[in-house]
Image (tube, rainbow, N blue to C red):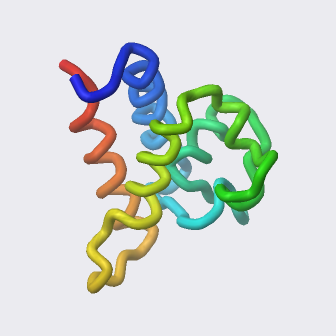
Amino acid sequence: MPFGARGQAFLKEMLVALDSLPAPRLIDGELEADGEACALGSVGKSRGIEMAGSIREPGSGLLCLRHTPALAAEIMYINDEAAAYWIEENPEQRWWRVREWVARHIAR
């Protein structure tokens, strides 16, 4: 199991949050913008936390999620940069790719 109990709980919550988004779309570079969110922002939205702002902005809503910085960094990488650089990826494709990654990392 690559993530501990706390990480597993967060990934399970994230899977539910991703599936609960009004449309299967994820943005990159920001937690939340124009009613859409990134993977971490989807958890904030499901918790009712205001997540607007850049992921990299100190004091952003990211701290409210209360998870380890390593897990946050991994999820930010998966959301924003893990797609091959030569492939154009739209928000729907990003949602599917991130959702698959989350589901694959949840211990059975």
Report whether residue 6 is seen.
yes
Residue 5, quarter of the rendered image: top left
Image coordinates of residue 88 in percent, x first then y, are: 34, 83
**Residue shown at the point (37%, 22%) measured from the top left:** 8
Query: Horizontally, is 93 left or right of 34 in the view?
Result: left
Tell me what residue is drawn at x 43 percent, y 40 percent. Answer: 19
Q: Quadrant of the N terminus?
A: top left
* Quadrant assignment, res 108: top left
Relative image position of residue 11 (x, y in whole percent): 41, 30
Q: Position of residue 41 (x, y in %)?
A: 61, 47
Q: Is residue 35 visible?
A: no
Q: Is residue 44 above or below residue 73?
A: above
Image point (75%, 43%), residue name: 61
Residue 52 on image: x %, y %: 76, 54
Locate residue 53 relative to residue 101 in the image: left or right: right
Q: Is residue 37 above or below residue 9?
A: below
Q: Is residue 48 left or right of residue 9?
A: right
Location of residue 45 with respect to 4 vertically, above or below: below
